[in-house]
Amino acid sequence: MADDSQSKSAASQPKIFADRSGVPALIANHIIEKIGEGVWKPGDKLPTERQLAAEMGVSRPSLREALRALEILGLLRMRQGSGVFVSTLGSEDMLIPLHLFISLEPGSVDALFEARIALESQVVALAAAKITDAQLAQLHETVIEPPESEKDIARFIDADLAFHRLITDVADSVFLGRMIKSIEYLGQASRQITGFVPGVMQQSAIDHRQILDGLAARDPAKARDAMTRHLLNVREAYREQLDPDA
């Protein structure tokens, strides 16, 4: 369906049907990759069923099943007599998982990091003033070595999530905690994207130790600066991955 000359970035695109097998799932992921690469943009009309089936080397019934699934999720819109179109990716009426919305919507990762920096830098400063030795020991356990292969990335992401959640728990701020909770799923989803950016995990391991140093010193300013640098580092690595010549 997709040859080796296609953009390598597609290999790291989140797979919405990654846990399913069968031809329709493969077709759906192929269409998602095309949209993610910008081959088909919001509002664009897809080729006809006959053309798509021939291009992908699949049967039309399998293609229709994939198209229906993507329409239900909100990624595609079928207009009777007109064809199949890429949706405008408005978040209001989409059932599509948030990690895919993040990967396709321009600027959404930047906006997420702006929110995380504003909230988490303040939360870690509060945590530095409250943290106990027992809580510090718990945080140390979540700081693990970066993965050596892609198959270990999930374990590192889990540890990264645990690290940030523990800091929020230590801060013990009801309102800030709720605000962070409200974007936690987005943060988790964004890690599925940034986790595959070269060097991010290695830098994150270094950054986490610097955040720990600020917490261990019970120094709010030091902890806040370390958290801000950490999130900026991840954001910049993601930007460079998107546009290496920028």
Image: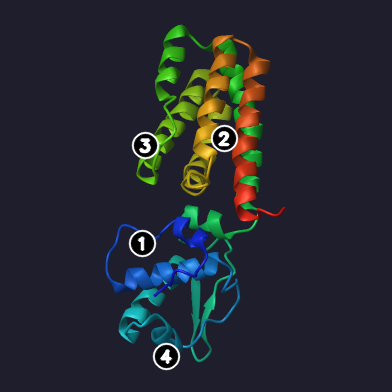
Residue 18 placed where, x, y %? 35, 58
Instruction: Indicate which disc, 3 or 4, sits on the residue closer to the N terminus.
Output: 4
Secondary-structure class at tag 2 = helix
Instruction: Indicate which disc, 3 or 1, sits on the residue closer to the N terminus.
Output: 1
Question: Is 245 situated left or right of 123 in this image?
Answer: right
Q: Nearer the viewer, mark 2 or mark 3?
A: 3
Residue 226 placed where, x, y %? 63, 24
Question: How far separated are the C-alphas under marks 2 and 3?
Answer: 25 Å
| Among the 4 quarters of the image, the one containing residue 138 | top left
Q: Residue at x 43, y 72 (%)?
A: 3
Disc 1 crowd rating (10 Å Cα; few below 14, some 14-19, many 20+) is: some
Quick one: 198 or 138, which is closer to the camera?
198
Residue 228 placed where, x, y %? 65, 29
Instruction: Indicate which disc, 2 or 4, sits on the residue closer to the N terminus.
Output: 4
Report which residue position mark 1 lands on. 17
- Quick check: 126 above or below 146? above
Q: Which mark is residue 131?
A: none
| Among the 4 quarters of the image, the one containing residue 129 | top right
Report which residue position mark 4 lands on. 50
Q: Given the image, on which type of amino acid does mark 1 rest?
A: Phe
CB-based contact (under 8 Å), mark 2 and mark 4: no
Secondary-structure class at tag 3 = helix
Residue 149 placed where, x, y %? 39, 42
Report which residue position mark 3 lands on. 155
Q: Nearer the viewer, mark 1 or mark 2?
A: 1
Question: How far separated are the C-alphas under marks 1 and 4?
Answer: 23 Å
Q: Which mark is residue 179?
A: 2
